[in-house]
Amino acid sequence: MKAANPNTMVQKWVTTFVSTSEHNTLSDGTGARAWEAPLVGFARGDDPLFAFLHEDIGSFYWTPLQAFHAAFPDHSATAGDVAVICWVLPQTSRAKDDNARASDGPSETWARSRHFGEICNDELRRHMAAQFAQIGIPAAAPVLTSGWGWGNSPKYGRASNWSERHAAYVAGLGTFGLSDGLITRAGKAHRCGSVVARMQLKPTPRPYHDIHEYCLFYNGGKCQACVNRCPVNAISPAGHNKKLCEAFVTGAAAAISQDRYNIPTTPCGLCQTAVPCASGIPRR
């Protein structure tokens, strides 16, 4: 009997969880799901892009090997021993449509996907680590380890020490836009997740050559839809002002979510909806 392809096996773990888990819900009493079918990508721990990110963002930023050792400090491993498994959880059409009609802050559907959908994402992270453990492979979600946190990048300001969007970029799932969102073949309206595992997996080919390849603004300069969607002018032709964005998300947007919908979360997503890249790679 032919042995199962390990990439196929791991991808099935992700897709089956998303399609069957009781956690994939908006918890609004309608049975509506938080996420559509996921995208899954793989990268080697010794991919040179991870070393580049470590140097470019700052010394506090983890390589996959450092993320693995944060969870398993007693395991000896090299960068080539570690695989990175990434997924993208696309927003539903309902969430995108509801948020596209919003202007001063998130819609209720979007706030629910940010809160209950991220609970689902955390459960998926734990599920993946447990699935690997069942076959004797150490694996962990970097963002759930005790060492995950925030640092100050000399170049980019406040930044986490493991970015799941950047890991997904390395794993062939998408490129960045003017607002710093990751544009994938399912669009920019999504959440990302990842685990690192001591396992050999075939890396997903990157079908792009530039970090901004899918963004219309960086390929002609005419699209500024995300600029127009931001209620606090945190996006401009100069890029994404993370301080303004964070202040709005943790302040006014969080208050809207709590006061209007009784949901304690920090949502927004306005720049991810009512834009050409909301649901796919836009045509130039």
Image (spheres, helix red, strand yellow):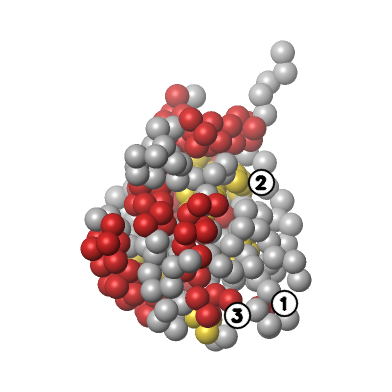
| Structural crowding at the residue carrying mark 3, measured as other residues with C-alpha within 10 Å and reported as few (<14), some (14–19) or many (≥20) | some
The image quarter containing residue 32 is top left
In whole angstroms, how far apart are the C-alphas of marks 1 and 2? 27 Å
**Residue sitting farthest toward the right:** 284
Which residue position is annotated with label 2? 203
Which residue position is annotated with label 3? 224
Asked if the residues shown at circle 1 and circle 2 are in contact, with their CB atoms under 8 angstroms apart, the answer is no
Closer to the chain start, of discs 3 and 2, is 2
**Count of marks overlaid on the render:** 3
- Give the residue at x 68% y 47%: 204
Asked if the residues shown at circle 3 and circle 2 are in contact, with their CB atoms under 8 angstroms apart, the answer is no
Which residue position is annotated with label 1? 219
Q: Quadrant of the N terminus?
A: top right
- Element at badge 2? loop
* Of labels 1 and 2, the one closer to you: 1
Q: From the viewer's perspective, is residue 80 above or below residue 246?
A: above
> What kind of residue is marked 1?
Asn
The image quarter containing residue 237 is bottom right
- Give the residue at x 40% y 61%: 107
Q: Nearer the viewer, residue 106 or 266?
A: 106
Residue 70, position as x, y percentages in the image: 37, 49
- Element at badge 3? loop
* Of labels 1 and 3, the one closer to you: 3
| Structural crowding at the residue carrying mark 2, measured as other residues with C-alpha within 10 Å and reported as few (<14), some (14–19) or many (≥20) | some
In whole angstroms, how far apart are the C-alphas of marks 3 and 2? 33 Å
In the picture provided, is 20 more to the left or to the right than 48? left
> What kind of residue is marked 2?
Pro
Could you say which disc has been placed on residue 147 in the image? none
Residue 261, position as x, y percentages in the image: 28, 57
- Give the residue at x 68% y 82%: 222
* Of labels 3 and 2, the one closer to you: 3
